[in-house]
């Protein structure tokens, strides 16, 4: 059994590529506030922030400046800006940080997420009281306040195409399949465990388990690396959904980001289905 995590040490990795500076500043500030609150509650000891600079060149100084400004809101947070490796992809960028972590817990955090001040404290308390849980995913709302469903059912190519590339006002004929994929029949005001597949804009893990599954699969340059990771984690530990851990996600669809992102999405989807199949293993 993994030991309790009271007063745990925590590392947080954020992978960036030409980020929106104002939004990243808000992400960093929310992380600093959550660190300070958890420390005040006695649930967090050492904290480390690792900002991974995937490019383009010349952004490292800006990233360090933003991080240092945000961390003035919390005391004694170690900061590392990992740079100079080029654009190695989202998952591999986080792997670079995980390899340097050295902490009990590691949080994979998107640069477009704002966490509630109480989020880390709630997550740490949950892991302390549930030693069988190795990773957790939070309750998430979009910037408009609408619930987002990070925990997913098994994806199908048809559902992924509709979600990614069909305008929302045309979703009507596909509503039943879309709702099933997002597991909307479940009560998301309550804890759900175990879960197998979750989006990774905020994924808090016991670092030893991340190392056991060898982190993210670097063959996913972008998209589906989080589905793949949580699915592999679910085979060695319990992944849980915790509604008391709250975040806001300012995300977007692949189709709105241009043809290159569509191509990356399709390539990653193909790899996911080749590795894991078109239907869940029994």
Image: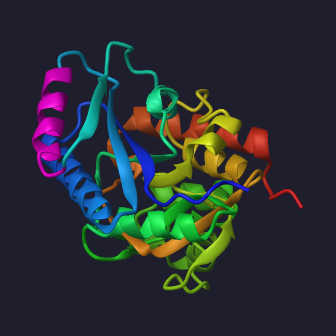
25 over 52 or under it: above or below: below
- Residue occupying image coordinates x 42% and y 47%: 10
Residue 48: x percent and y percent?
34, 39
Q: Which range of residues does the magenta coloring cover?
A: 60-74
| Main SS, magenta residues | helix
20 sits left or right of 219 in the view = left
Q: Is residue 68 magenta?
A: yes
Which of the 4 quarters of the picture holds residue 77?
A: top left
Residue 233: x percent and y percent?
68, 50
Which of the 4 quarters of the picture holds residue 218?
A: top right
Q: In the rendered image, which quarter contains the N terminus? A: bottom right
165 sits left or right of 208 in the view = left
Q: Nearer the viewer, residue 28 or 272?
A: 28
Q: In the rendered image, which quarter contains the C terminus? A: bottom right
263 over 236 or under it: above or below: above
Query: Which residue sits furthest right?
Result: 282
Q: Is residue 62 magenta?
A: yes
158 over 262 or under it: above or below: below
251 sits left or right of 263 in the view = left
């Amino acid at each position: 059994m993994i030991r309790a995590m009271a007063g745990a040490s925590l590392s947080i990795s954020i992978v960036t590529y030409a980020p929106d500076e104002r939004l990243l500043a808000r992400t960093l500030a929310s992380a600093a506030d959550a660190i300070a609150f958890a420390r005040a509650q006695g649930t967090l000891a050492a904290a480390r922030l690792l900002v991974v600079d995937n490019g383009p060149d010349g952004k490292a100084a800006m990233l360090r400046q933003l991080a240092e400004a945000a961390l003035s809101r919390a005391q004694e947070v170690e900061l590392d800006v990992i740079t100079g490796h080029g654009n190695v992809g989202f998952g591999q960028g986080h792997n670079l940080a995980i390899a340097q972590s050295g902490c009990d817990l590691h949080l994979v955090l998107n640069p477009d997420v704002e966490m509630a001040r109480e989020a880390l404290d709630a997550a740490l308390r949950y892991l302390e009281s549930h030693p069988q849980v190795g990773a957790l995913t939070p309750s998430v709302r979009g910037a408009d306040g609408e619930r987002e469903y990070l925990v997913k059912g098994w994806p199908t190519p048809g559902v992924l195409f509709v979600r990614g590339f069909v305008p929302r006002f045309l979703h009507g004929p596909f509503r039943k399949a879309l709702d099933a994929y997002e597991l909307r029949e479940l009560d998301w005001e309550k804890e759900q465990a175990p879960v197998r597949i979750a989006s990774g804009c905020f994924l808090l893990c016991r670092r030893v388990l991340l190392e056991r599954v060898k982190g993210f699969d670097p063959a996913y340059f972008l998209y589906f690396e989080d589905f793949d990771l949580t699915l592999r984690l679910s085979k060695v530990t319990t992944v849980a959904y915790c509604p008391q851990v709250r975040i806001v996600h300012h995300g977007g669809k692949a189709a709105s980001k241009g043809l290159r992102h569509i191509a990356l999405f399709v390539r990653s989807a193909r790899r996911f289905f080749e590795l894991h199949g078109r239907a869940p293993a029994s």
